[in-house]
Image (tube, rainbow, N blue to C red):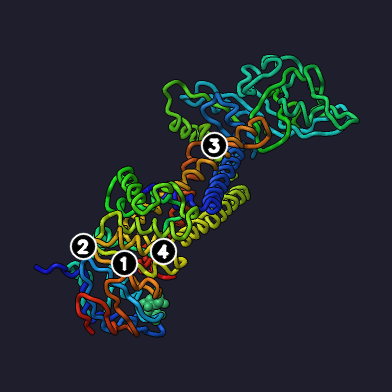
């Protein structure tokens, strides 16, 4: 009876395509929107990923996410270094400073100051120059997107001439010279990222008593990280997180304190509802239209159980095709946008998520049809 | 030995449709016997209960009272599953509106009863082609219903009603959608191909021009059989 079910389904091309398109739409929205959402959310902590090397981040207790800087006193660094199980601990400055461009305009930059000796926490990829060049006087490394765009020299034509090695910038009235160009992962903030040494960063920054943003800690080999975090907290009274925990903290901050999840949630829900409405209703309509045929099959001795399987098969078929097309289109979308500013992250869990969504629509559509067909009186076959 | 055992025996069959606000007595004590090998026509004014009666006989509608036995079995007392199997094996249907599945070819349509009875698709379709040849449609086995004329569609339907060798074929107005000549041809075919000593045919019709094909004609009015004309068993009721 399977081939009959499939032929009945595809007999009406228009309806069949309508169902598949509805499901494709739902599947596309339910995959693509969360992919963008996840991409965006992962940007909230991409700075932490970029720093990479340290096991543990130590910071003020009240810090809520990675860009929420609450400076510490420099002495905290030495206290952390003194804790057993710490292999090394390095200072990091992170803050927003104003850069004066060649044409006299100002641009806020995200300045990262690295330990002068080790330069730990530097950019993940160097495009030009090397991180060691930071040791040269007034040296800074600028991220490529910032160098090309916001820090570029404006021309009368509106285009910008990218900042290049050797160019100078004024950071808070201090001279800085570009010694390298780096590639960093995009963050939520669109400001250019400027790397320099810790002491130079302190120099650039407005004079304050506390300027230490984070202490980056590497644990001794074999040291249990959870254990060490607890020890740091207990000893210093500061907050200490593993890299992953700090990412989660940041991510959750954005989840709970911004409208981003709700906005995407609404998109996904709309995709689900519209898809369910189009596909579900068309599927049901197609069953209604075929009701007499189901009645004929019933009169000729087909059991409800077989009819149920036929409808389920139809639902599984359109569901699989619609889901496949939607997910495929999403992947294509992500691929074609791979070099753009667009955030996009497509983990396998997302496949499960949209798969469950499409399944739900299909089950709902099939259920309505099944109820109708099971209740159908075979005697209708003789009605005119 | 009885040369013509009974295919159908109805005693005092009552069917009342309850539509909520009103009750319609469609069958009001029907008594009727149909013999094997017989072509029985059922005639009567519109709304007198002809369709209701053949629905009960074919086992797709339960009567509310009375007794209806088909090949010695009481349909009302059967379980659902047994009744389904009974229909699948013993009943063939021909409808006024043909009721072919529009997405299936002629051969696929004809093969459906065999597939319902569990035959493999390829075997069923092979047999369907043979039956289509029998009804003169050997050249149109791959045609869709929409590509066939009304008369051809009805012949496909007849092939479908026959293919699983049912012992009873019920037809509701099989010629009413067809012009006179086509209807006549369809009846000739039914009588030639479908009628058989081990099979009974019940044909509901308004069409006086085909009365000649009947062995007997049962006349209904207002939910009763008011008379049976023709040779064979004596009328009751
Ligand atoms: N499903 C139903 N619900 C309610 N009433 C029904 C139903 N089917 C038939 N009836 C009523 O039962 C009576 C008998 O109907 P039936 O269809 O058996 O008549 P018929 O002799 O076949 O008529 P026709 O020649 O017009 O086909 C009619 O009054 C009809 O209105
Ligand atoms: Mg009728």
Q: Give yes or no for contact between labels 4 and 3 (Cβ–Cβ under 8 Å).
A: no
User: Do discs 3 and 2 share a chain?
Assistant: no
Query: What residue is rendered at 28% in x and 82% in y?
Result: B225
Q: Nearer the viewer, mark 1 or mark 4?
A: 1
Q: Nearer the viewer, mark 4 or mark 3?
A: 4
Using residue A236 as the reference point, say whether residue B100 is left or right of it: left
Could you tell me residue A336's position as x and y percent? 64, 33
**Residue at mark 1 to residue at mark 2: CA–CA distance:** 16 Å
Among the two numbered marks 4 and 3 on one chain, the one whose residue lies closer to the N terminus: 3
Using residue B18 as the reference point, say whether residue B85 is left or right of it: left
What label sits on residue A372 in the rendered view?
4
Chain name for mark 3? A
Question: Which residue is label 3 attached to?
Answer: A346
Quadrant showing the C terminus of chain A: bottom left
Q: Nearer the viewer, residue A7 or A351?
A: A7
User: Do discs 1 and 2 share a chain?
Assistant: yes
Chain name for mark 4? A
Question: Which residue is label 2 attached to?
Answer: B197
Could you tell me residue B129's position as x and y percent? 35, 47
Q: Nearer the viewer, residue A260 or B7?
A: B7
Q: Report if residue A301 is visible in the image.
A: no
Chain name for mark 1? B
């Amino acid at each position: 009876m399977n081939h009959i079910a499939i032929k009945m389904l595809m007999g009406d091309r228009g309806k069949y395509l309508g169902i598949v398109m509805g499901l494709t739409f739902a599947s596309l929205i339910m995959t693509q929107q969360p992919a963008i959402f996840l991409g965006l959310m992962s940007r909230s902590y991409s700075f932490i990923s970029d720093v990479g090397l340290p096991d543990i981040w130590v910071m003020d207790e009240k810090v809520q996410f990675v860009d929420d800087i609450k400076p510490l006193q420099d002495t905290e660094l030495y206290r952390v270094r003194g804790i057993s199980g710490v292999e090394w601990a390095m200072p990091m400055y992170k803050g927003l400073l104003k850069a004066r461009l060649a044409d006299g305009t100002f641009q806020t930059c995200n300045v990262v100051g690295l330990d002068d000796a080790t330069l730990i926490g530097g950019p993940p990829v160097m495009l030009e120059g090397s991180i060691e060049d930071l040791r040269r006087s007034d040296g800074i490394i600028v991220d490529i997107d910032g160098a090309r765009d916001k820090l570029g020299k404006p021309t009368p034509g509106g285009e910008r001439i990218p900042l290049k090695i050797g160019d100078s910038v004024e950071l808070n009235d201090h001279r800085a010279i570009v010694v390298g160009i780096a590639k960093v992962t995009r963050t939520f903030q669109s400001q250019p990222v400027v790397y320099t040494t810790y002491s130079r960063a302190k120099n650039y920054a407005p004079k304050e008593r506390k300027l230490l943003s984070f202490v980056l800690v590497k644990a001794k080999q074999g040291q249990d990280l959870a254990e060490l975090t607890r020890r740091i907290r207990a000893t210093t009274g500061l907050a200490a997180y593993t890299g992953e925990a700090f990412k989660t903290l940041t991510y959750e901050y954005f989840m709970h304190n911004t409208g981003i999840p709700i906005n995407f949630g609404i998109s996904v829900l709309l995709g689900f509802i519209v898809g369910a409405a189009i596909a579900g209703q068309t599927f049901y309509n197609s069953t209604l239209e075929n009701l007499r045929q189901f009645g004929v099959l019933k009169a000729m001795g087909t059991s409800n159980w077989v009819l149920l399987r036929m409808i389920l098969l139809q639902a599984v078929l359109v569901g699989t095709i619609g889901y496949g097309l939607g997910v495929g289109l999403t992947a294509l979308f992500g691929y074609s946008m791979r070099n753009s500013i667009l955030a996009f992250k497509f983990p396998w869990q997302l496949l499960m998520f949209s798969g469950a969504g499409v399944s739900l629509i299909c089950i709902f559509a099939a259920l309505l049809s099944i109820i109708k067909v099971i209740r159908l009186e075979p005697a209708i076959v003789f009605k005119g | 030995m009885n040369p013509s055992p009974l295919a159908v025996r109805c005693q005092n069959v009552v069917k009342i449709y309850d539509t909520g606000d009103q009750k319609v007595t469609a069958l009001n004590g029907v008594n009727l016997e149909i013999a094997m090998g017989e072509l029985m026509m059922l005639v009567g004014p519109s709304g007198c209960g002809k369709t209701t009666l053949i629905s009960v006989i074919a086992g797709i509608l339960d009567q509310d009272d009375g007794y209806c036995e088909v090949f010695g079995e009481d349909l009302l007392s059967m379980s659902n599953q047994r009744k389904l199997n009974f229909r699948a094996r013993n009943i063939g249907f021909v409808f006024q509106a043909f009721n072919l599945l529009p997405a299936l070819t002629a051969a696929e349509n004809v093969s459906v009863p065999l597939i319902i009875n569990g035959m493999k698709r390829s075997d069923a379709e092979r047999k369907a082609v043979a039956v289509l040849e029998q009804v003169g449609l050997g050249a149109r086995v791959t045609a869709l219903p929409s590509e066939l004329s009304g008369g051809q569609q009805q012949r496909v339907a007849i092939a479908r009603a026959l293919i699983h060798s049912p012992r009873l074929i019920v037809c509701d107005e099989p010629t009413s959608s067809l012009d006179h000549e086509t209807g006549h041809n369809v009846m000739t075919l039914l009588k030639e191909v479908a009628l058989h000593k081990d099979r009974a045919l019940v044909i509901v019709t308004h069409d006086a021009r085909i009365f000649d094909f009947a062995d007997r004609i049962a006349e209904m009015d207002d939910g009763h059989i008011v008379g049976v004309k023709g040779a064979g068993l004596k009328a009751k009721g």
